[in-house]
Image (spheres, coloured by chain):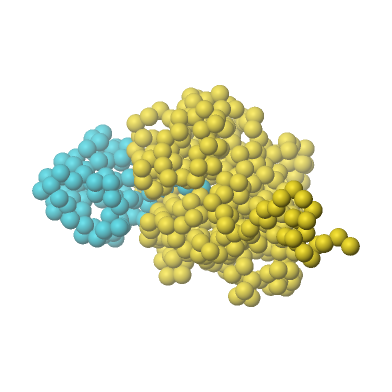
Chain colours: A yellow, B cyan
Amino acid sequence: MSVESLKCKECGTAYELDARYVCENCFGPLEVAYDFSGLDAAEAKRRIQAGSQGIWRYRDFLPFKGRASDPLEPGLTPLLRADRLAERLGVAAEIWIKNDAANPTHSFKDRVVAVAVAKAKELGFETVACASTGNLANAVAAHAAAAGLDSYVFVPANLEEQKLLATGVYGTNLVGVRGNYDDVNRLCTQLAETHPWAFVNVNLRPYYAEGSKTLAYETVEQLGWELPDRVVSPIASGSLFTKLGRGFQEWLDLGLVEGEQPTFNGAQAQGCSPVATAFAEGWDVCKPQRPETIAKSLAIGDPADGPYAVEHARRTGGGVDAVSDQEIREGIKLLAETTGIFTETAGGVTVGVLRKLAERGEIGDGERVVVYITGEGLKTLDATRDTFQMHEIDPALESFEAEFPQEVAV
Amino acid sequence: MSVTVKIPTQLRAATGGQAELEVEGSTVGEVLDAVFDAHGGLRDRITQDGDLRRFVNVYVSGEDIRFQQGLETSINDGDEVTILPAVAGGC
């Protein structure tokens, strides 16, 4: 049982386990292939449960031959039952919130970066880099600092100030590119050809993406080794969405869990919805868009894994929906008011789509739904500005009572 | 019209290691045909049934041709055509 090779998802050509991400025959994406023969499900479960309190407990399912580690270990984030949210939505379903903002840099990106940085060290790189919409920038800068590696972080220059501050603080080389994410990504694809750097989401992308599977594993473990009936997850490039599916499938195939693949519902912002559009139109490719949305962490107009995300939504009887900026703000507020979790705009997108599914009557009675909240509200404060009012008073009882006449003491 | 075509590292085995090619053409389609005439091994790697494969991106002077007229996108003097893998990036 071990990691075996990199394999093209399109044509199956196999490659050595080095820093590469594209098939030379057909340009398809490479994915890590494992040999799980000889894996005993009961023994694998025991190893997991005796493992660390984070993603390295799933090391048997991650792309390392040796013992990978990371001083900033992410994972084992809370999975919370959200009955008050279900009530507000008017559904008789079990709604669970996987709060992945509870990671070291407050987004699910810590998972993929922990795996990519460990792989970069194993392959002997001294510098890590990334093209980011913000959360990845935070994670790469932090994990590079913890691991003692140099880092270059490329972001659109107009990113939210909170995300810039939460990146620069780690002492990285923060580069703001005058353009959108897709421009940043094109530049990084070119830089990866000429610089001996580990670009976590370019030349290390096959390993990096594997980190997202740990979200699926944790869900199963936290549900008492059972699968959800439905998952609602945001889609930017489509990598998280498809790797959740792969994580569930691996454990189904290996007998660590029984049942079937959950129904997959993807969530996008209307201002950047190439995957939702491809799903609605019945296309098997995504036509790129120029993003215009407050959900900047999902603003990828040319999603690399878009076609696979569309396929997975179709195969599981799910779908991909898009919500407006107003619905995103309402989604943030709805989650905060019913669960005490303050999410960023991407979470607003996800909750907005959950609400849509509820309104359309697609969530069945008794269904167990897991909603993936991938980032922290403090990183996108502008989205909540002016959505409520503060009561300003003088430091005097009369002043308080004048403001709140219904609360006058008797 | 003479145009420079940038070849990504993953395809250079098919161009004998060349990173840039100079060819003639007035649309992206003509430019690519000229590239395939010079290096036959590239055709099947970049195209399938006459269309670009789904994980290939082509840019004319930095602009994705899918925001323009695809393979019909016209080429102006001094333009640079860049071929890149589409599978990079993202979350």
Question: Which residue is nearer to you in this view: A154 or B75?
Answer: A154
Farthest-out residue, right:
A410
Q: Position of residue A147 (x, y in %)?
A: 58, 26
How many badges with numbers are in the image? Answer: 0
* Picture residue at 58% right of the left edge, 55% below the top: A384
Q: Position of residue A71 (x, y in %)?
A: 65, 29
Judge left or right: residue B31 versus residue A228: left
The image shows residue A341, relative to residue A2, as above or below, that is below
Dividing the picture into quadrants, the one containing residue A232 is bottom right
Dividing the picture into quadrants, the one containing residue A138 is top right
* Picture residue at 64% right of the left edge, 32% below the top: A72
* Picture residue at 47% right of the left edge, 63% below the top: A270
Judge left or right: residue B62 versus residue A34: left
Q: Is residue A229 visible?
A: yes
Judge left or right: residue A73 versus residue A202: right
Farthest-out residue, left:
B1
Question: Which residue is nearer to you in this view: B61 or A334?
Answer: A334
Question: Which residue is nearer to you in this view: A203 or A17?
Answer: A203
Farthest-out residue, bottom:
A361
Judge left or right: residue A94 versus residue A191: right
* Picture residue at 78% right of the left edge, 59% below the top: A401
Q: Position of residue A335 (x, y in %)?
A: 66, 59
Q: Is residue A262 visible?
A: no
Q: Position of residue A165 (x, y in %)?
A: 53, 37
